[in-house]
Image (cartoon, rainbow, N blue to C red):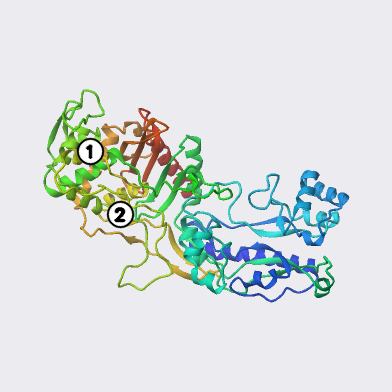
Amino acid sequence: MTDKRRIFVLAAAFAGLAAVYLMRLFLLQGGGLPSAEKNGLVVQAVRQRQEVLVLDTGRGDFVDRYGAPITGGAIYGVAAFPAASGGRVDAAAARRLAAAMDVEYEMLADWLAGLKEPDWWRGADGNGPPAAFPEALDKAIRTAGVPGVYLLPYHIRYAGDKTGIHAIGFIGQHPELTARLYAPELARGDRSLSDTVGGIGLERSLDRLLQGAGPTVAYRSRSAEADTRGIRAADELKVKAPDNPYFPLTVVTTLDLGLQRKLEAYAARNGLKEGAIVVLDARNADIAAIVSRPELDPFSISEGADETVNRALRAAAPGSVFKLVTEAAALETGRLHPKETFHCEGEYGKYGLSCWLPGGHGRLTLIEALAQSCNVAFAEIAERLTADELDRTADRLGLGRRVGWQAAKSGEPPGPVGRLLEEEEAGRIFARIPRRRDGGLLAQTGIGQRDVSVTPLQAANLMVTLLHGGDVSAPRIVKEIRYADGRLMARLPARRAPSRFGRVSPATASALLQGMEAVVSAGTGKPLQRAQWRLAGKSGTAQAVAVNGAPVNHQWFVGYGPVESPRYAVAVLAGNRPAGSANQATALYRGVMDIIAAHEKASRSG
């Protein structure tokens, strides 16, 4: 089945389910549904005199590349309207309801008695989304006889048993962000500071498109007579919904949700406490999976919380991964011959710089120097260069700048989408380009220390760049946006992210690929020889800011596979690891590649 067909079937299925829900409400209230309103005014139209409960926010949803839902889904939840009981709860009826719901009577009675506005039963802790119940519970709820309690359909955004995906993000009330993004709408009275908006990720980048045409709400309308006499009476339950065939939208991402969830579970299982895993399609840099740790709980967010940071988009010191850039700069400028040899005795002799291997590596070819990650050889290479040459070569390779997909440049017709993944950091090579030659700065920069910082997304994209002979792609996470009826609204084409300084030559790219193959066949990546695919890549370890006085390192592995016909590029960052500990990223990289290989095999056989 094609992607378009899957999206159409998904939309049709949910539309059908929604129709069933509305029909059940139609029968329950014994009358016709009121006419629909537009642009979110359905809530405003009833809020002044009625109590409103949102069944569906109308916000657009995300699906993966195969049409599997990432957000959205339908459940039945237990809802209560406090006005119906006037704050009084009959104990016998509440006991019958608690038994039907299989919850503790005292907890349910306290919840009902404490309601100030309509709300959903959210479980024992009272947090998260509405608790899901079977449709068959409807009859038991009505039989229990608690006024104002119903079994209603609810469009749930995030699955309660899954962790959030940082790149998708979360939604919530963000008054400062709302004030900044929607000032004109606030001034007109079309929006409120308490409105829900996207906090991070695509939820934020695409917030205007995702807002949709307004929510579907359930309410109990108070009659004019009740208002006049001050009686807490209420009519039967009613529903209002927007009448717009184009919304909500569906955003089709490049993610493979099955692979994403497998890698999230793998990272948790293997103790990745702080870091990221990025998997790119080697053909076009599409993001197949993007994992950040600590994990994100979209139902429990604290402002500025550490777990809201997408570490795949945050720059960190890359260590020896940057030696790829140093070699490229020296080859491109002619200051390094591919057949050159080096001698390492373990100490560089200046700047306090040593090789990681006590006693050194002895005589090394250039390929061996990269394979063994020799600090002495690469410090020597870096000192032959200027800061400008290192900086510009990094830019040519897509480092030191944001490379994620963004909208059309000048000269192209504007589209409905700007930059995706707005949190992506540019990273840097130098805090400031020195006016005078500084050998120590060059040597330390050449081995990926000092001021150098790179994001895992950039590091994975570097692999794609080299596989494409030096042509830099713009990693994409959304490929198209569709209307509610399945028709195409916008297609986001794969894009390049060229440097203003040009590109590195295919010969240089080939030399770096050859060196990364040697890393696994004869160098620091030998443990990867037992992987399901033949792999290539480069490890890195960089000193980081001490945590609670203890020295820590950022550990990296970036690479691609299978070597014979590369299909995936992967970057793994294990951040703030104890100094001297084994490179966790290398071990995780092998597991990630094995999971990808097995996942691809299962997908083909399925």
- In this view, the residue farthest toward the bottom is 35
Mark 1 is surrounded, within 10 Å at the Cα level, by few (under 14), some (14 to 19) or many (20 or more) other residues, namely many
Quadrant of res 517: top left
Frontmost residue, 445 versus 231: 231
Q: Position of residue 585 (x, y in %)?
A: 38, 36
**Residue at horizontal 19%, vertical 27%?**
347
Mark 2 is surrounded, within 10 Å at the Cα level, by few (under 14), some (14 to 19) or many (20 or more) other residues, namely many
The disc labelled 1 sits on which kind of residue? Answer: Gln
The disc labelled 2 sits on which kind of residue? Answer: Arg
| Left or right of 456, for residue 486 | right
Instruction: Examine the rendered structure and indicate whether residue 599 appears above or below residue 222.
Output: above
Q: Position of residue 267 (x, y in %)?
A: 47, 39
- Identify the disc placed on residue 444: 1
Quadrant of res 231: bottom right
Q: Position of residue 283 (x, y in %)?
A: 34, 54
Q: Marks 1 and 2, how far apart in space?
A: 20 Å
